[in-house]
Amino acid sequence: MSALLRATSAVLFALAVGTGFAHAADKKITLGFSQIGAESEWRTANTQSIKDAAAAAGINLKFSDAQQKQENQIKAIRSFIAQKVDVIAFSPVVETGWEPVLREAKAAKIPVILSDRAVDVKDETLWVSFMGSDFVEEGRRAAKWLMDYGPVKALAAKGDVNIVELQGTVGSAPAIDRKKGFEDTIKGNPAFKVIRSQTGDFTRAKGKEVMEAFLKAEGKRINVLYAHNDDMAIGAIQAIEEAGLKPGKDIVIVSIDAVKGAFEAMMAGKLNATIECSPLLGPQLMSAVKDLVAGKTLPKRIVTQEGVFPAEVAAAEYPKRKY
Ligand code: AHR
């Protein structure tokens, strides 16, 4: 062992190969995490998972809630850089506009992990790993389930299937990708038509408001609602009932997340299917943070494994749901 290496281990330093940053092995790891907000049941579960996992892993977590504003996330990341945290992780509210702050993190030699949502930047060395769901696949799964669902198949055989779409936050990865996955899949069948599509910003209140507008404009023409998350579907269910229609029967509803609220709606016969998107990213994130600090190279992409839950399995699955 060289004198230099001996000296290095004597002061208990772990060198992070490939990331160019160093961390004293006897020091508690500090992670700065910028969360989007608390817009949905999913997001609340995601925050809890991150907080619980950090506590269990003995990681010092600096947590910041951006209240769905990109400028707040940028401020939080800058403050993490100023505080010299060991690792920064964040769920980007939108895809674009991150280059300057990510360059600042790189210059400060602080590695950045993307959690849940991706960014759209030319230089992919600005972040080390992206862990989360395949949102395009979720959109495809929603469309496939719909095209296979008996009552919708029967409608398609007779004429048009008029779909209204509640999109997530404008410019966010899940809104862009879930729209694309769904559209690409229904394209092959001309009976399936998206007649209205608007953002409900991933919230129940907006989901309700936009569904009211859809119903006003289209009335009983609407056969299907595709919502980019369960919260918007739950808000829309209220609007549908207030309009004197039966959600799940007069309007078939498929949404994404598979939160407990969706299972409750399915058991009540008001939602027809939910496509899983797991928020339980905390343990995976903490082990990635530890690996990074120990000098390991992380996979660039870590995809979450997820399923599809139709209403028929809701009662059996509900007791097993963790969020
Ligand atoms: O990024 C994941 C999405 O964000 C979830 O589907 C939605 O509920 C949340 O707000």
Image: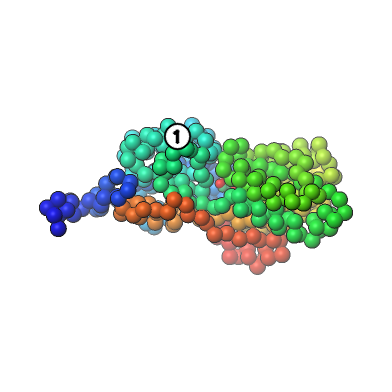
Residue at image x 14%, y 58%?
1
Amino acid type, residue under disc 1 in the picture: Glu
Residue at image x 82%, y 54%?
156
* Residue 290 visible in the shown view: no
Would residue 171 be found to the left or right of residue 156 on screen? left
**Residue lying farthest to the bottom in this orientation:** 316
- Secondary element at image label 1: helix
Q: Nearer the viewer, residue 181 or 201?
A: 181
Point out residue 126 in the picture as x, y percentages from the top left corner. 41, 40
Q: Does 183 appear above or below 280?
A: above
Would residue 241 be found to the left or right of residue 142 on screen? right
Residue at image x 39%, y 56%?
287
**Residue lying farthest to the front in this orientation:** 188
* Residue 201 visible in the shown view: yes
Point out residue 285 in the picture as x, y percentages from the top left corner. 43, 53
Point out residue 98 in the picture as x, y percentages from the top left corner. 47, 35
Q: In the rendered image, which residue does mark 1 sit on? A: 99
Point out residue 212 in the picture as x, y percentages from the top left corner. 76, 39
Count of numbered marks: 1
